[in-house]
Image (cartoon, rainbow, N blue to C red):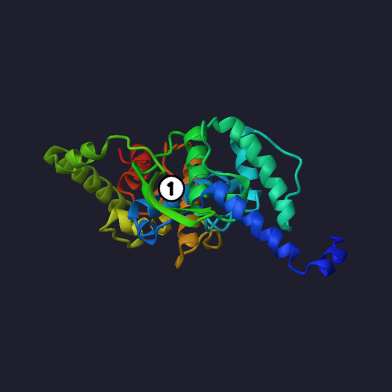
Amino acid sequence: MDGGGAMEADPFHNAKEDEHMDAQTFKAGKMKMIQPDSLKDPKLDKLKEQVLLGWINESLKAEHIVVQSVEEDLYDGLVLHHLLARFAGVHLTLEEMALTASAQIRKLEAVLEELDKRLEQQDTKWEVSLIHKKDLLATLHLLVAMVTRFQPEVELPSNVKVQVVVLEVSRTGIQSDVQTEVLTEDRGDNAQEVSDTNDPMEQLMEMEVKQTMLNFVNKTMAGVGLQVSDLDQQFSDGVILLLLIGQLEGFFIPLSDFRLTPDSHEHRLHNVSLALSLLADLGLQVSAVQAQDVVSQDVAGTLKVLYALFRKHGG
């Protein structure tokens, strides 16, 4: 900027202007911050770390894009641009890697403009500046809206709420208020979930299915000396699942293709994603199951994967 003369005339000019702009933005936006206690909510953690993160990585797996944090990895527009192309078929003429803040903001403006057209939200709870500032609340609202619009079959945790502190600057000072922000709607299935859990017949049927799958797995893996006792936990890293597929289908999966001793979430996610890809190649479609479901030891997801193999080989 060529404002050297202005700085000599008033050394505090820029600082005053920035202060004024920040206050105006702050006032207009009613800055929101999630309370620390809400960040510890298991339902929020599941939504953020399992469902949304898993959805992004599964959606962009073919493009070899791996996102590790919804807060840290979406601010520059690259991931959102790829999701826009993947689900809406919109390919904008934008630089792939926006390295400067101004370039990132321009990219976000273009991408969010196209997304907003398709999400058709009456009252959007995100904006370019918030996404670029890595605002968690705005980013979660945006991702939930995208999943709901583009892949409604993905099961979001029901009734996820957070407590937020709303701060507003006025001439008399800073005013604060605590509000409840709804991230996902209440599907009204909480009572049904409790009922299902307490229904002896439902419990018996689940136990029977798990035992049938357990017997099927152990019978198959007996030839290689493996014994499984816990389907959810022992399948969550993808290793036994890959070995099971290889054993049933009669082919060897090179050790270089997967992590035999996975020691991180990314390694486990890679293994399970590979297993699901192999099942798809074999024509065994596992509907509505994502790699993250198995990694997070989701009972229903794990059983669906095993049942697909059981239907083909268990008879």
x and y, in percent, of residue 203 in the image: 17, 43
Q: Helix, strand, or loop for circle 1? A: helix
Neighbor class of circle 1 (other Cα within 10 Å; few <14, some 14-19, many 20+) is many
Camera-nearest residue between 7 and 199? 7
Using the rendered image of the protein, determine whether residue 304 is visible from the camera's viewpoint: yes
| 306 on left or right of 78 | left
Camera-nearest residue between 138 and 201? 138
The amino acid type of the residue labelled 1 equals: Val
Image quadrant holding the N terminus, namely bottom right
Q: Which residue is mark 1?
A: 51
Query: Which corner quadrant of the image does residue 10 belong to?
Result: bottom right
The residue at 76%/48% (across/down) is 95
The residue at 49%/63% (across/down) is 259
x and y, in percent, of residue 148 in the image: 47, 35
Using the rendered image of the protein, determine whether residue 98 is visible from the camera's viewpoint: no
x and y, in percent, of residue 127 in the image: 59, 44
| 46 on left or right of 28 | left
- Residue that lies at the very extreme toward the left in this rendered image: 200
Camera-nearest residue between 118 and 284? 118
38 over 114 or under it: above or below: below
Image quadrant holding the C terminus, namely top left
x and y, in percent, of residue 251 in the image: 49, 51
